[in-house]
Amino acid sequence: MATLAPAPAVSRSNPLALFARLAQRALPLDLLLLVQRFGIATIFFLSGRTKVEGWFTLSETTYFLFENDYALPFLQPVHAAYAATVAEHLFPLLLVLGLFTRLSAAALLGMALVIQLFVYPEAWPTHLSWAGLLLPLIAFGGGRVALDRAVRIP
């Protein structure tokens, strides 16, 4: 597993180096990746839950939004509504499990890019923060606390 750059050498005259070393020990990469997986999964999963009633019945509001506000130039509204709803349930679940982490993060990043380009172009700060959580998962995977490791998925 790749690691981030080591903290500077600790000296009594350099309190920032001491803080960096303590932070690196207290916040190992595997913990950061776990928090990132749960954080971004929560955002997308809760968004998916707003699109359904009960277990998994798309609401009339969802159909209306995909026909009017979320209209995509390359996908029929009904297909887009189902694809987005399934993606917002499936990929967050996989991220929480740490299963197919890189693929799931890449799929959600693709979804964020579509939202940015075609739905809410003014919401780039939000989408940039999502990318900030997803890109390390694509680069590093789910970490040691992930099912990817148990089933040997890179």
Image (cartoon, rainbow, N blue to C red):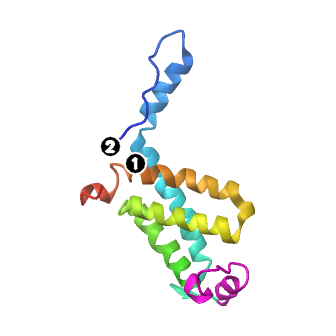
What residue does disc 1 label?
Answer: 140
Which element carries disc 1, helix, strand or loop? helix
Dot 1 and dot 2 residues touching (CB under 8 Å): yes
> For this view, does 135 lie left or right of residue 29?
right
Q: Position of residue 82 (x, y in %)?
A: 54, 84
Kindly give the residue lying farthest to the left in the view shown: 151
Q: Earlier in the sequence, mark 1 or mark 2?
A: 2
Indicate the amino acid at tag 2. Met
Badge 1 crowding class, 10 Å Cα cut-off, few under 14, some 14 to 19, many 20 or more, is some
The stretch of residues the image draws in magenta is: 60-80
Give me the disc on residue 122: none
Per the image, the residue denoted by label 2 is 1
* Residue 42 x/y as whole percent: 54, 63
Which residue is at a point 70% across and 87% down the rendered structure image? 64
Q: Residue at x 58, y 56 (%)?
A: 130
43 or 125, nearer to the observer? 125
Of residues 151 and 77, the one drawn nearer to the viewer in this rendering: 77
Task: Say if residue 34 shows up in the picture.
Answer: no
Give x and y (percent) for residue 3.
Answer: 38, 37
